[in-house]
Image (tube, rainbow, N blue to C red):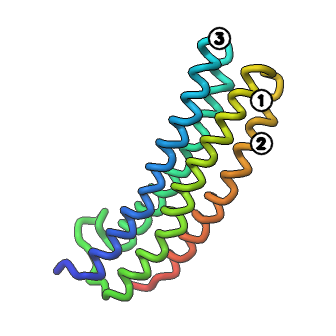
Amino acid sequence: MEFTMGGFLAILGAATASMAGIGSAWGVAIAGMAAGGVIAEDPKKFGPTLMLQALPGTQGIYGLLIAFIIMNKIGVLGGSIAPLTTAQGLMFLAASLPSGITGTVSAVWQGKVAATGVQLVGKRPEEIAKAMVYAAMVETYAVLALLASFLMVNGIQI
């Protein structure tokens, strides 16, 4: 099949969605730096701090999921791209924005909230559940963005 502007835009959409991984890397790093400080004082707190550090990593998974769904729908994973119009490509690009943008931003902020949770666990390990709830609240918006992108991608007719 001939590669069209629509195909390019759809692949750009998949790449945009997967950029949520940048935010996840950043958020995991923020929480990990805080965890390193706690572990230096008390290595027994590795488990609880690791759970908090891992939370911002989910946004990257959400973005990758949307990227795979787009690539599957347009045929990239099957070996040939569907002949998409420019309008269809733009729709895929637009559908990727909630996951790509919200995922990136929420992962960074979730990393910051998780870092404060790590500090809480460092002083009061019995409060791990509260720290997890605070960090999970930020996750809510990444999940909503995932749902929005998913519904939009599945609504595009090719």
Compared across the picture, whether 90 is left or right of 104 comes to: left
Which residue is identified by label 2?
133
Cα separation, mark 3 vs mark 2, equals 24 Å
Q: Which mark is residue 41?
A: 3
Crowd around label 3: few <14 · some 14–19 · many ≥20 (10 Å): few
The earlier-in-sequence mark between 3 and 2 is 3
Amino acid, disc 2? Val
Amino acid, disc 1? Ile
Q: Residue at x 46, y 77 (%)?
A: 94
Q: Quadrant of the C terminus?
A: bottom left
Cα separation, mark 2 vs mark 1, equals 9 Å
The earlier-in-sequence mark between 2 and 1 is 1
CB atoms of marks 1 and 3 within 8 Å = no
Q: Residue at x 51, y 55 (%)?
A: 104
The earlier-in-sequence mark between 1 and 3 is 3
Q: Which mark is residue 128?
A: 1
